[in-house]
Image (tube, rainbow, N blue to C red):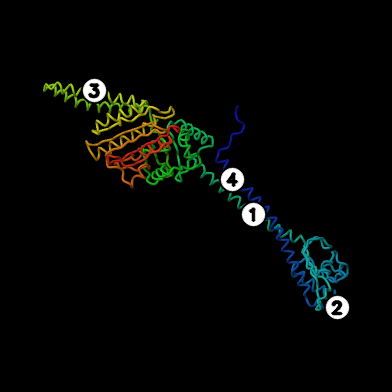
């Protein structure tokens, strides 16, 4: 069905609305000012009437004429002269008996005054009021006439007819109307300019088009798998998708709010100030490690904000995890292959030299060592993830030429079902790797790392110690802080931070001390009843 009325364009609506607002404002102000002008005009005429009345009351000839046999003969000419010179409607002089001695209509001289003078005579008051007398409606002023002895002998009454007041008000209103019309025309011109400016700012789009683009953008952002957050240069969030809300809800980053994380803020400000993107920045949030890309938002050739794309390292892609697992297996196989190749060459040499007994002994020792390690781990460590982690590190130590010793007295068979061993092996592997690197760096092929553990009592305890250089006292308070590292290159300084956060998540503790070998000892304590 066709619409009978086509909705006007946004430009027309803006001009009409702004013009209507201007018209209502001008009209309201005109009414208010008109009322003020009327009140001010009447007040002004009242004050003017009082001035004229006092001037007449203080005229010496008028005061002296009250003693004459016929005061009106002297007073009438003086009163008329005052009336004509001031433009008053009337100037009436009366005695205490309310008898007129002057009036612009001479037939009223000698008659009783039309309004009461009680307040003037009894209180000696000067009064201003609006009333109707024989001359018509007027704004009046009355004041007592006092002789030289201070006695009230009469009254001076002056009035300005309201016709005069209304004439003045009409003149003022006409000027006000002309000014209002001028202001209204200015307002219409301003409305057109503003409306065109607004249309230009929104790329000449109509509201329906803007609404569609907004919904399209919202749907696009929500459909993006990665967490996406847009902020302005004040770190205020202007756009955030569902994925970002789920990931960052603990950091109070909601639409209309602000990014409160200090490191995120520093990355945002760095991008805005340098106009350079940041790619694949590692970032620890809570107990999760993320990769963050930050790109500037350019407006009028200037950065006005930034867009953050956040991807949890654990969820970047399933293929990444698979590749990592394959790489780990590959490293172990390479380590074993390297070790077995050396031993195979040794066995080959012994056989070539016909040293058969030595060859059998070497093969027997190797098989026994391998079997001993596997048997020990399977009997002493009931959790397959922890056992696999330790076995992998043993193979890795052989490649690094580090002696990794597992304390034979160690035991780990009473592990609560609530203990997240998948999470814990991240801690264990990280600490052992750091220990092997530290020992190898200082001792070379004489590097030694010892791991011991127990579940005796109410805690699960792991000790990892090495014969490396140890941790200087001034570093011990910093090593668990974000960004602290002794390694070269970017994206370091997060390993021990992740370790500390996971241990906190497991309600445990980690302690740093000096090992018996001269290096560092890390002690991890996880309570059984709190995991």
Badge 4 crowding class, 10 Å Cα cut-off, few under 14, some 14 to 19, many 20 or more, is some
Give the residue number, with chain letter if any, for mark 4: 18
For the residues carrying marks 1 and 3, which lies nearer the camera in this image? 3
Residue 324 sits above or below residue 19 on the image: above
Q: Secondary structure at mark 3?
A: helix
For the residues carrying marks 3 and 2, which lies nearer the camera in this image? 3
Residue 368 sits above or below residue 297 on the image: above
Q: In terms of depth relative to the viewer, which is nearer, 116 or 173?
A: 116
- Lower position in the chain sequence, tag 1 or tag 2: 2
Disc 1 versus disc 2: distance between alpha carbons? 56 Å
Disc 3 versus disc 2: distance between alpha carbons? 152 Å
Q: Secondary structure at mark 1?
A: helix
Q: Where residue 302 appears, x then y in whole percent?
A: 41, 45
Disc number at residue 178? 1
Badge 2 crowding class, 10 Å Cα cut-off, few under 14, some 14 to 19, many 20 or more, is few
Q: Is label 2 in contact with label 4 (beta carbons under 8 Å)? A: no
Q: In which quarter of the view is residue 72 placed?
A: bottom right
Badge 3 crowding class, 10 Å Cα cut-off, few under 14, some 14 to 19, many 20 or more, is few
Q: Is residue 102 left or right of residue 234?
A: right
- Lower position in the chain sequence, tag 2 or tag 4: 4
Q: In which quarter of the view is residue 457 placed?
A: top left
Give the residue number, with chain letter if any, for mark 3: 367
Observer able to see residue 301 = no
For the residues carrying marks 4 and 1, which lies nearer the camera in this image? 4
Residue 351 sits above or below residue 211 on the image: above
Q: Is label 3 in contact with label 2 (beta carbons under 8 Å)? A: no
- Lower position in the chain sequence, tag 3 or tag 2: 2
Q: In terms of depth relative to the viewer, which is nearer, 170 or 273?
A: 273
Disc 4 versus disc 1: distance between alpha carbons? 20 Å
Give the residue number, with chain letter if any, for mark 2: 67
- The residue sitting at the left extreme is 353
């Amino acid at each position: 069905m066709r619409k009978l009325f086509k909705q006007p364009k946004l430009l027309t609506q803006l001009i009409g609305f702004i013009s209507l607002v201007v018209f209502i404002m001008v009209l309201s102000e005109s009414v208010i000012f008109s009322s003020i002008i009327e009140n001010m005009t009447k007040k002004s005429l009242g004050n003017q009437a009082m001035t004229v009345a006092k001037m007449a009351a203080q005229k010496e000839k008028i005061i002296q004429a009250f003693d004459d046999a016929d005061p009106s003969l002297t007073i009438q000419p003086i009163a008329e002269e005052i009336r004509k010179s001031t433009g008053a409607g009337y100037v009436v002089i009366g005695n205490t008996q309310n008898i007129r001695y002057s009036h612009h209509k001479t037939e009223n001289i000698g008659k009783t005054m039309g309004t009461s003078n009680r307040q003037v005579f009894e209180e000696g008051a000067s009064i201003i009021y609006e009333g109707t007398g024989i001359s018509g409606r007027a704004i009046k002023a009355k004041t007592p006439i006092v002789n030289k002895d201070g006695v009230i002998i009469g009254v001076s009454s002056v009035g300005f007819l309201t016709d005069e007041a209304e004439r003045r008000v009409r003149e003022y209103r006409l000027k006000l109307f002309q000014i209002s019309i001028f202001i209204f025309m200015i307002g219409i011109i301003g409305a057109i300019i503003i409306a065109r400016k607004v249309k230009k700012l929104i790329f000449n789009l109509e509201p329906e088009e803007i609404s569609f683009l907004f919904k399209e953008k919202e749907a696009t952002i929500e459909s993006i798998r990665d967490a996406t957050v847009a902020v302005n240069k004040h770190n205020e969030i202007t756009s955030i998708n569902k994925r970002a809300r789920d990931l960052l809800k603990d950091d109070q980053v909601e639409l209309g709010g602000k990014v409160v994380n200090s490191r995120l803020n520093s990355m945002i400000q760095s991008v805005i100030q340098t106009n350079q993107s940041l790619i694949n920045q590692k970032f620890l949030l809570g107990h999760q490690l993320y990769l963050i890309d930050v790109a500037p938002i350019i407006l009028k050739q200037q950065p006005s904000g930034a867009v953050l794309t956040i991807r949890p390292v654990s969820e970047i892609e399933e293929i990444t995890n698979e590749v990592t697992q394959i790489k780990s297996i590959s490293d172990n196989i390479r380590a074993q292959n390297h070790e077995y190749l050396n031993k195979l060459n040794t066995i080959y040499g012994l056989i070539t030299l016909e040293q058969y007994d030595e060859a059998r002994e070497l093969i027997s020792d190797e098989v026994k060592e391998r079997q001993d390690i596997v048997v020990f781990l399977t009997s002493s460590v009931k959790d397959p993830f922890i056992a696999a982690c330790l076995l992998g590190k043993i193979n890795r130590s052989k490649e690094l030429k580090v002696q990794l010793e597992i304390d034979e007295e160690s035991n780990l068979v009473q592990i609560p079902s609530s203990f997240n061993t998948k999470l814990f092996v991240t801690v264990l592997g990280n600490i052992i790797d750091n220990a092997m690197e530290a020992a190898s760096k200082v001792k070379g092929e004489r590097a030694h790392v010892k791991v011991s553990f127990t579940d005796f009592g109410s805690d699960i305890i792991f000790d990892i110690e090495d014969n490396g250089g140890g941790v200087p006292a001034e570093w011990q308070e910093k090593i668990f802080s974000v960004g602290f590292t002794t390694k070269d290159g970017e994206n370091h300084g997060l390993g021990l931070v992740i370790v500390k956060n996971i241990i906190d998540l497991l309600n445990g503790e980690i302690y740093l001390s000096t090992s018996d070998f001269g290096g560092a000892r890390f002690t991890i304590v996880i309570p059984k009843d709190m995991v």
